[in-house]
Amino acid sequence: MRKILATLVALLVIALALPAHATAPPGLPGDLTSTEVSFRGGGNLELRGSVISPAAATAGRPGVVLVHGAGTGTRREKLLAEAVAFARQGMSVLVYDKRSVGYSLFKRSYAQLAEDALGAVGTLRRQPGVDPAKVGLWGLSEGGWVAPIAAGRSTDIAFVILVGANALSPLRQQSWATAAGLRKAGVGGSLVDRAEPSLYRVIADGGMFPEPKHDPVPFLAKVRQPVLGIWGVHDLLTPPRETPPIMAEALEAGGNRRYAFRFFADADHAAHLTPDGGVTRLPELAPGYAELVGTWVREATSGRAPVAQVSGPDPVQASDSFGMPPTAWWESAAMQLVVVVLLLVAFGGYPVVALVRRVRRRAAVTPVKAARLASAGGLVALLGGFSYLLYLVMTGGKLSVPGPMAGDRPILWLALQAIAVATVAAAAVTAAAVARAGRAGPRGERVRLGLLVAGGVVFVPWALYWGLLLP
C-alpha cells in the first residue's frame, strides 16, 4: 500500500511540474490556441487566466493583457470576443478571471487591481514566443482607471489601450451615466435632475460608493507609454465628449504626446455595435476596431506611435456631467438616516398603536380619517421612493428601464409624487383637527396625532429635497 501511495504522489508531483497544455476554451476558433496560466495579484491572491495566441504564431510577437470593467469575479469569457479578435491580429492575449476577494459593490481598490494587472503582465512576458519588450495593457471602462496606475508603476508595460475610459471621478461618471440612461429613456424632471444625483451623494457620504473621488488625471500624467484611446460615439456610461480632451491634457502635462484617440460610429461603451444609440450591445465589435488595435500595437512597439492624433465621427453626448459638491450637514448620510427613522416612527406609530389597542381589546377611539391617509401615504412615499431610486442606481450601469412613462415622467414616480402631495394635504387636515380638538380626548391619542403631524412637518422639506414635491 505504501508503494502504491508513493507512486501516486510521485505521479502527482510530475503532473504538477509539467507545463500547462494548450486547451480550447468554449467558443475558441480552430485557428487559435489557448494556454492556461496562473499568477499572483495584489495581496498575493492567486488569479487564473488564458493566453490565447494564433496557432501559427511567430516568435517575437507582441502581447496584451485585458483588464475587465466593473464587476465582481467577472469571468474571462466576458472578454472572449476581444481576445479572439486581437489574437487574430498576431498577438498573444492574456485574459483572466477578475478577483472577487477584496472587491465588492461597496469596496474595491484600483491600486490593488493594478497589482493584479502587473502580475498578468509579468506572466505574459514569460510566455514562449512573446517579446517581453512588446507587452501592453488594454483596459475597459473601470479598467481605464486601473491600467494607467499600473503603467505609471512599471516600465515593463510597452503600451496602453483604453476603451470607454474615463478622465472624471467615479462618482461623477456614475451619476452622469445613470442620468444619461434615464434621459435616453425619455425621462425628465425632478427624478433625473434632483433625486438621482442626491442619492449618489448620500451613498458616497455614507461610505457605500467605492473610490468615489479617485482622480485619474495625476495617474494619466505619469503614463510615458504610447496610449490608444477608443470610444463608441454612443457611449452612455462614459461622457464621450468630455473625457478625451481631459485625457489629452493630462498626458501632455506629463510630456507624453504619443497618443491616438479614435471614435467609432454605431458603437457603444465597449466599442461593440449598437442598433439603438448605446442601449443594446451586440456581440460584434465595431468594424475596424480590432484591425486598428493590431496596426497601432505594431507601430507603437516599433517606435512609430502616432502623435496627438484624433479621428472618427463626433461623439454623441446629450448632456454634460456635473460636479458633486460635498454634502452639507443637513443632507449628510447620517442626517438622512436620522430623518428616515423619525419619519418611520411618526408615520408608522399611528397604525402600530391602533394594532396594539386592538390586540389588548381597549376601547376604540374615533379616528381622524385624514390621519390614516397621512400615515399610509407617508410610509409609501418614504419606502417606495427610496426603493425605486435604489433600483435605478443599482441597475444604472446597465441602463435600467424606468418603467411605463406618461410624457417624460415614469408612471411610478408620478404615483409617488401624487402620494407625497396627498400626504402633505392629509397631515395639514390632521393638524387642523388636532388644533380644533385642543385638550379634548385621551392624552395618548393626542400624542399619537401630534407625532403624526410632526412627521408631516418634517416630511415637507424631505420630500422637496428628494424631488417628490417638485415637477
Image: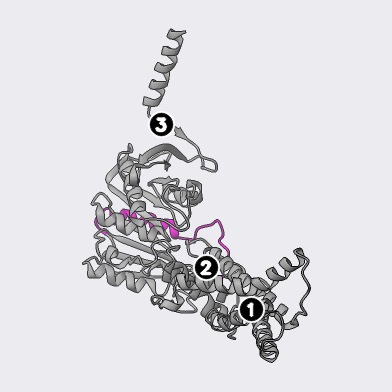
| Frontmost residue, 422 versus 225 | 422
Foreground mark, 3 or 1?
1
Give the image quarter of residue 48. Answer: top left
**Residue at 27% of width from left, 52% of height from top?**
158
User: Which residue is disc 3 drawn over?
Assistant: 20
**Residue at 48% of width from left, 50% of height from top?**
74
Residue kind at label 3, given as amino acid type: Ala
**Residue 409 location in percent, x, y?**
63, 80
**Residue 369 location in percent, x, y?**
75, 82
On residue 266, the disc is 2
| Picture colour scheme | one colour
Q: Residues within 10 Å of mark 1 (few under 14, many from 20)?
A: few
Any magenta on residue 37?
A: no
Residue kind at label 2, given as amino acid type: Asp
**Residue 190 location in percent, x, y?**
56, 81
Foreground mark, 1 or 2?
1
Foreground mark, 2 or 3?
3
User: Which residue is disc 1 drawn over?
Assistant: 447
Q: Residues within 10 Å of mark 2 (few under 14, many from 20)?
A: many
Asked whether residue 235 is in view, the answer is yes
Magenta highlight range: 277-304
The quadrant of the picture occupied by the C terminus is bottom right
Give the alpha-carbon distance from disc 3 to disc 1, as whole Å: 75 Å
| Frontmost residue, 325 versus 61 | 325
Give the alpha-carbon distance from disc 2 to disc 3, as whole Å: 40 Å
Q: Disc 1 or 2, which lies upstream in sequence?
A: 2
**Residue at 78% of width from left, 80% of height from top?**
366
In the displayed structure, would residue 67 be above or below residue 382?
Answer: above
